[in-house]
Amino acid sequence: MSSNSKPSIGIVGGTGDLGRGLALRLAKAGHTVLVGSRKSEQAVEAAEALTAELAQRGVAHPPIEGLDNESAAQRGEVVFVTVPFGAHTPTLESIKGAVQGKVLVDVTVPLVPPRVARVQLPPEGSAGMIAQTLLGEDVHVVSALQNVAAAHLQADMDIPCDVLVTGNEKTARQTVIDLIESMGMRGFHAGLIHNAAAAEALTSVLININKQYKTHAGLRLTGID
């Protein structure tokens, strides 16, 4: 556990829009954040830019560091994977040894350009299922945050979104729900990793809605206080 008693967070593929948004939110919530990239120099640049942005907002926070993906996965006590689907499998293979025994949060959506507004789930069922099968049962894969716009995460605003959280270990899901709540959203237990397919498919639905209504739509669950 990191010195501030909150788990350090490794963000694999952390220089993209979604990774940067998560880094901002998690650093603001008091976590040491390790931004990963295939090229460590790009991660260092991103970490410096994120640190400057939070300073401009007047937010005190633990360090944000830039590293290569494997080092970020090795040092992070909880690891997020936020890479495009085309890089999903090779990225997981590259960090497999570094994430054994950890909670790994898979945010990847199986979008297949150029038809990203059409649901195209992989033969394995979902990116979450691919991750759990590839990494093995000693890695607690949790699928979450596919339906939250990167623009919302990066903005200095409350996020009016709920998050479906799936995974085979309830305690791992709860760890991720706690992180989601620390970022200003509500997270909900949504079943085993097999159910990740539902949240992943909804991303393409939301892309259609966003194009039609020129917005960044998210999900809200009703009937839960």
Image (cartoon, grey):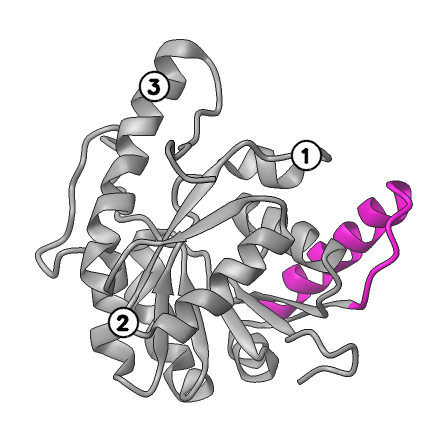
Magenta residues, dominant SS class: helix
In the rendered image, the vertical position of residue 35 relative to residue 102, given as above or below: above
For marks 1 and 3, give the CA distance.
Answer: 20 Å
Residue 132 or residue 44, whichever sits in front:
132
Q: Which residue has dot 1 on it?
A: 155
Q: Quadrant of residue 131?
A: bottom left
Q: Quadrant of residue 156?
A: top right
- Sequence-wise, which precedes: disc 2 or disc 1? 1
Q: Which residue type does callout 3 highlight?
A: Ile
**Residue 56 magenta:** yes
Q: Give residue 21's mark.
A: none
Q: Residue at x 33, y 77 (%)?
A: 93
Q: Which residue type does callout 2 highlight?
A: Asn
Horizontally, is 5 left or right of 201 in the view?
Answer: right
Q: Which residue has dot 3 on it?
A: 209
Horizontally, is 61 left or right of 125 in the view?
Answer: right
Q: Which residue type does callout 1 highlight?
A: Ala
As drawn, which residue projects farthest toward the top? 213
| Residue 36, horizontal then vertical, whole percent | 58, 67
Residue 188 or residue 32, whichever sits in front:
188
Horizontally, is 105 left or right of 7 in the view?
Answer: left
**Residue 12 magenta:** no
Horizontally, is 48 left or right of 189 in the view?
Answer: right
Q: Secondary structure at mark 3?
A: helix
Q: Which residue has dot 2 on it?
A: 168
Cβ atoms at labels 2 and 1 below 8 Å apart: no
Which segment did they paint magenta?
39-63
Q: Quadrant of residue 144?
A: bottom left
Cβ atoms at labels 3 and 2 below 8 Å apart: no
Labels 3, 2: front one? 2
Q: Residue at x 39, y 46 (%)?
A: 146
| Residue 184, horizontal then vertical, whole percent | 62, 45
